[in-house]
Image: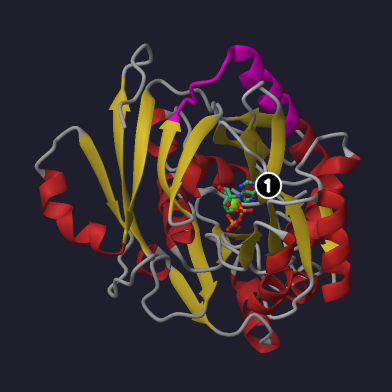
Amino acid sequence: MTTLAPGQTIGILGDGQLGRMMAIAAAELGFKTHIFGQEKNSPAAQVANANTIADYTDKVALRKFASSVDVVTLEFENIPTDTLNFLSPLIPVRPGRKVLEITQDRHLEKSFVNSLGVPTAPFANVESLEELRQAVERIGTPAILKTRRDGYDGKGQVKINSATEIDKAWETLGGKASILEGFVPFELEISIVAARDIHGNVATYCPVENRHKNHILDVTIAPANILSTVSEHATELATKIVQNLDLVGLVAVEMFVARDGDVLVNELAPRPHNSGHWTIEACTTSQFRQSIRAAAGLSLGDPTAHSNALMRNLIGDDADHWNDILQHPEMSLHLYGKTESRPGRKMGHVTRLFPLNVPPKV
Ligand SMILES: Nc1ncnc2c1ncn2[C@@H]1O[C@H](COP(=O)(O)OP(=O)(O)O)[C@@H](O)[C@H]1O
Ligand SMILES: [Mg+2]
């Protein structure tokens, strides 16, 4: 089992803001980073030691990348599994192919979660209009149709409020292999970031509440305002998932909390997560350092929060107000170095700390 020492190089597949914050954390621990991505002057490449711009299927570039790094990790779960198959014999890849196969496909993901005895919304695999009709009959409405692959920030999903909307929903998603999910009338949405090291030790961050705007994460409130019994139960579920994924690295577990305190798992992300950005300021070990420690084969750090926190995303034009934000000395501003602002694009985030006994004010 490969263990890295400071000075060695961590390869990161993907070049967005998560890769950027992973590269910064790696530098803090004395590691070098090499980003493999598609974009020139990407958020991650701006802060890394080396950068390869190539397609994930470019075997020549992948071989060269593998020979220039000591371990490979990722900031993006939709890396083609063939890329990991190609890299795996050449270099340790953490997390590995099996984890990506599961988390790239909503049907495999939810089936895996249920196989552990962990509940999700009721769901059905849907590969034709006829199967969608049968699924709506079984699950009822309202329901949400989601493409099995490639969805994010609410893209690739459509709500079905009544049976009359079935044909339109199927058309909207372009007839792609999908799942139909029962709509969960949740009280709040929470997530837990869990880490696992090469020896199987697990560390979990506290559950946080996530509020969305236009299907994009708007604010994260740490910790979530839930009963301690619910918090402990959610943490047990996240621990079970990370252990059974047999993963080295991080997994973020998104969950719904029902009014009666029931917890259902919504989705998994095998990497640092937007809802974990608050850990940079508020925890002994941030999620980014934790992901680097795990990838490097090192022991995990303490995930304990020394403060409560509120994290707000800066989407599109929000980031134009960077100077106003800087007028508030209690705010920690993070910008991702994206030159082009687009509606819905994550440009940065702001974190504000609160004492442990003070609930964050939204
Ligand atoms: N079954 C469901 N019931 C109620 N709301 C849902 C359900 N599935 C998703 N949502 C809402 O849509 C958001 C995005 O769905 P999600 O499955 O997390 O996809 P992604 O984050 O990849 O776009 C969730 O955070 C939640 O607010
Ligand atoms: Mg989600």
According to the image, label 1 marks what residue?
A: 183
Task: Report the magenta residues as a range.
Answer: 222-238
Q: Is residue 229 magenta?
A: yes
Instruction: Decide: is 169 above or below 199.
Output: below
Q: Position of residue 219 (x, y in %)?
A: 39, 42
Residue at the location (56% across, 64% down)?
12
> Could you tell me the amino acid type at mark 1?
Phe
Q: Is residue 308 visible?
A: yes
Q: Is mark 1 within 8 Å of ligand 1?
A: yes
Residue at the location (41% across, 70% down)?
45
Residue at the location (45% across, 27% down)?
284
Instruction: Decide: is 10 above or below 309.
Output: below
In the rendered structure, the answer to whether residue 284 lies left or right of residue 95 reads: left
In the rendered structure, the answer to whether residue 37 lies left or right of residue 167 reads: left
Prevalent SS, magenta region: helix
- Label 1 crowding class (10 Å Cα cut-off): few <14, some 14-19, many 20+? some
